[in-house]
Image: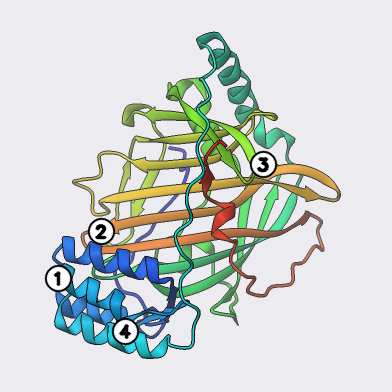
Amino acid sequence: MVRLRTFCLLVVMAAGSALAQRQMTVEALELFIKSSINLKHPDKQVADVVKTLKLTQRLTASAVENLQGMGAGPRTLEALKLLIAGSAALPVPAPPVTTAAVITQPPPSEAEIRAILKEVTQNALDYTKGLPNFICTQVTRRHVDPYGTGGFQLADIIQEQLSFVDGKESYKVALVNNLAVQNVTHEQLGGTTSSGEFGTMLAEIFKPATAAEIDWERWGTLRGRKTYVFQFRVLQRNSEYSVYDQASGRQGVFGYHGLLYADVDTKMVMRIKMDLDGMENFPINSVSLDLNYDMVEISGVPFVLPLKVELTSRAGRYATRNEVEFRRYSRFSADATIIFDVPDEIPQDQLEEQPIR
């Protein structure tokens, strides 16, 4: 059976790295507290997560009073008061931005949609044929949420040299938490890992045997470019998307559904956003994937290549989130090397859909 992607979940993480501080805006903090209140998470667990946070903006007493009125517990309030003191020198959050009016644009006709999908499908199936042999840096930031409260904490940062040669991917682990490692394979990393971003997912969705159901959803904008947005679904009986749980040794193949974003001008898929179906009785209960592509130059020639993957999984309350970025693309040669460091994260506004204006 072809393995499109492999996810290995280990419930035990290194305690020291799991306590790394996570930066958060005041808005994100308020959403986290409100969600925890609605889900009736224990006050102590919520407070323990709040104590690991580092705010990027000033938290005011009035904001904490509002959360108290909504039902935040006493331990959570004590932790929030510490954040008030710790963020006093930071700037106040900007006022909410008024959303501009969204222009309603009629969808393409049925005939136009069929023609668009035909071209998008062919480009997806031919995708890897047009790629050169190359190497790049793969930076994976792995986060854990042991209690299912939404308070993800950075566990580790992994840097790998990824080689794409003759349509196949290979990985060489170079650094873990900025420390050099040797003779560690991608599969030996433990925790949650993935592979298959360079065209495997595209081929799986669009090949005829998959019989994906693809329908028009809406217009969209991604990184400043207009896109077609389609909804899609792949049934389990036609899927080759496998998930492996290392703790139990079980492997399952699952259907999935989500959204496809295709560039209006190039008819190339630029984003795949999806959730797996039917995982209720599997040790890993849910898996979500958000894969963004972008135009990248290699030796002066532009190619559509993966930009970032966000992979979220959950087993009971225990959740993980991997943020995988692809940097420093260059042509492959026998003596090609990559200089490793920890680059800044890709700005969130480059990954989010913007409305048509």
* Residue behind mark 3: 167
Residue under the point 58% across and 24% down: 121
Assign the C terminus to one quadrant of the image. Answer: top right
Q: Secondary structure at mark 2?
A: strand
Q: Secondary structure at mark 3?
A: loop
Nearer mark to the viewer, of 1 and 2: 1
Instruction: Answer with left or right where residue 171 lies relative to residue 60.
Output: right
Nearer mark to the viewer, of 4 and 2: 4
Q: Secondary structure at mark 1?
A: loop
Contact, mark 3 vs mark 1 (Cβ under 8 Å): no
Nearer mark to the viewer, of 3 and 1: 1
Residue under the point 63% across and 74% down: 342
Q: How is the image coloured?
A: rainbow
Residue 350 image position (x, y, % from top left) = 59, 53
* Residue behind mark 1: 71
Q: CA distance from mark 3 to mark 1?
A: 54 Å
